[in-house]
Amino acid sequence: MNFFSLCFQSSDYEPSLPVTEKSNPLTRDIDRASPSGIVGMLEACDAQMFQRETGTNYQRLFDDQVVTTLTEVAKRVELILKDPQDSLVVLSGCGTSGRLAFFISRFNEALKQLNRTLVYSYIIAGGDRALLSSQEAPEDDPELGMLSLQKVRLGKKRVLFIGVSCGLSAPFVAGQLDFCLQHPEVYTPVLLGFNPTHQARDEPIPGCTFTFRSVAQRLQELAQRRKAFLINPAVGPEAISGSSRMKGGSATKIVLEVVFLLYINKGIAASKKTSCLLHSGILQHMREYERAVEMTYQHREGIAALVEANEGGVCYLGERKKRWRGFIRGGYKDLNNNEGPLSSLDFLHQVLPSLTDRDTVLLIYTQSDDLHEVVNLGRKVREKTSNIHAVHHRTDSVEALLNKLCIFDTFWQWELSTKLVLNAVSTGAHILKGKIYRNHMIDLQVTNSKLYRRAARLLQKLSGQAETECEGALLKAIYRADKLTEEITSCDITAHTQVARSAKKVVPLALVSLLTGCSLKQVESPLAPSVCECVRARGNGPCDYKALWVLNRTIQVSATSTSTISSNACAV
């Protein structure tokens, strides 16, 4: 086992940070890697999910205690399925966790095929619009979480509530779990995350008497009597620090699906007589997901080709203001989400006609799709752009038309495999565009309290300056002020993040200002050094940062006196 794959478990490694916020030693140099190297590092990170070490500080996915807890949760699912009229399984989360709650609630479709009553429901902070675009602000609202749960639960006498918060940090989910604990006659709460309980967020939540950690500790106590359940194996730090959409999202999908899949397979019933069968069934499913990850990365060069095709971070799908757009055969209505179609934008009629060679199109399809239809669509796209690729599983047609990447042939594992590929493409695009330094996202959006704290920590780590100086620089960048007024400093984090939602490049500006000692006006100048130039200069020892104003820059003045800047250094 690679030493760097294990060292995050040491109590001496970034001791002030929870596992989900630590930097991963495996990806320390991912910002300088080739596309193939990027994919190789992502593979090593994803393999950490399935490591089976013993005697470590953390529970792991295959640990007996984790599998036993999943078995107990599976039995609660069966109780819901036996009494579907008065019962419900609710999955809830924020951001990626909420999107996964939505996707996993599609187990209703499998129940429908078995002529069973539908029992799965989902909640996502910010509502269905958060399925397509970031809505980080609601993550900080525990009351909104509680009210959303009450609304979904109406008329049900028994609810198995599964709250997902990868870092054990989201106030939205904490509010829901606290509400469940106040009403044990209705709710059985389950918390899913990937930090140990003592690393759960302990920051006071405005208007509440509890913190996320105190809620998690209460759940841990009740779990001993099987009145609540805590599922929190460590899966290792993310490839890009704190980016829980990646490994945290994958592990969420695996953990919940291995439980729900038990009831798609005929003949399995969760009773005392079949506990061993449930336990072995969960292990079997997890091994199948592990194999899916391994098989996906056997196509490393194909994935790397997709990453390279999107060099610079541009993957236009017709709408120039948005770098990434996704479309669904049949339209967004086929998602069957709670609040109706998320968009009326149609790829064939509204996007395809405007495609150019600046655009890259990635087709994702399965064996069950109409391959004739896929081929026809591919031909139409090929007439507009040569940048067309495909991700599919075990299909031997359309080879001449598409740059195809053939992966997997089982639906649930195919979904995971597709997720890993898209994670690699989007992450690689950020890296190649220069938004990553080492394994930290520099162009971080400071849109909720979690991200505000992460930004402040990042500034401190990369600048080497004191916490107060870094937070001051962060606030100056948020408010675009060279001096902080009492009005600004007296506001709470919620007020700061509300302003930050409309501010651009907050962290890059704050960091360059800290490293150069320059004002924000100077830092925003076209001649200012990039973030990566400044940080790398600091890493090389003493440096005249202001000399970087002209280093590696070529100014080309056009006839209209507009300036164009070129640089061989990465820029945010």
Image (cartoon, helix red, strand yellow):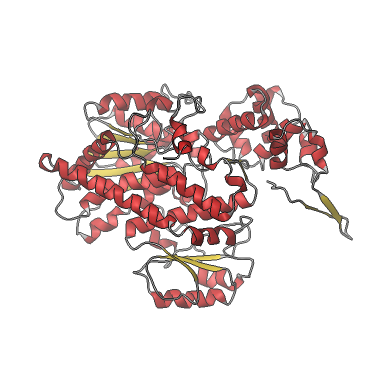
Question: The N terminus appears in which quarter of the rendering?
Answer: top left
Q: Is residue 86 visible?
A: no
Percent of width and height locating residue 94: 44, 41
Residue 548, placed above or below residue 363? above
Percent of width and height locating residue 396: 39, 74
| Residue 531 or residue 377, whichever sits in front | 531
| Residue 312 or residue 207, whichever sits in front | 312
Residue 172, placed above or below residue 114? above
183 on left or right of 464: left
417 on left or right of 462: left
Q: Is residue 283 visible?
A: yes
407 on left or right of 445: left
Percent of width and height locating residue 459: 64, 31
Residue 154: name its quadrant: top left
| Residue 238 or residue 95, whichever sits in front | 238
Percent of width and height locating residue 301: 50, 60
Q: Residue at x 37, y 70 (%)?
A: 369
Residue 54, placed above or below residue 528? above
Residue 124: name its quadrant: top left
| Residue 205 or residue 283, whichever sits in front | 283
Residue 389, placed above or below residue 63? below
500 on left or right of 236: right
The mark tally for this picture is: 0
Q: Residue at x 40, y 31 (%)?
A: 174
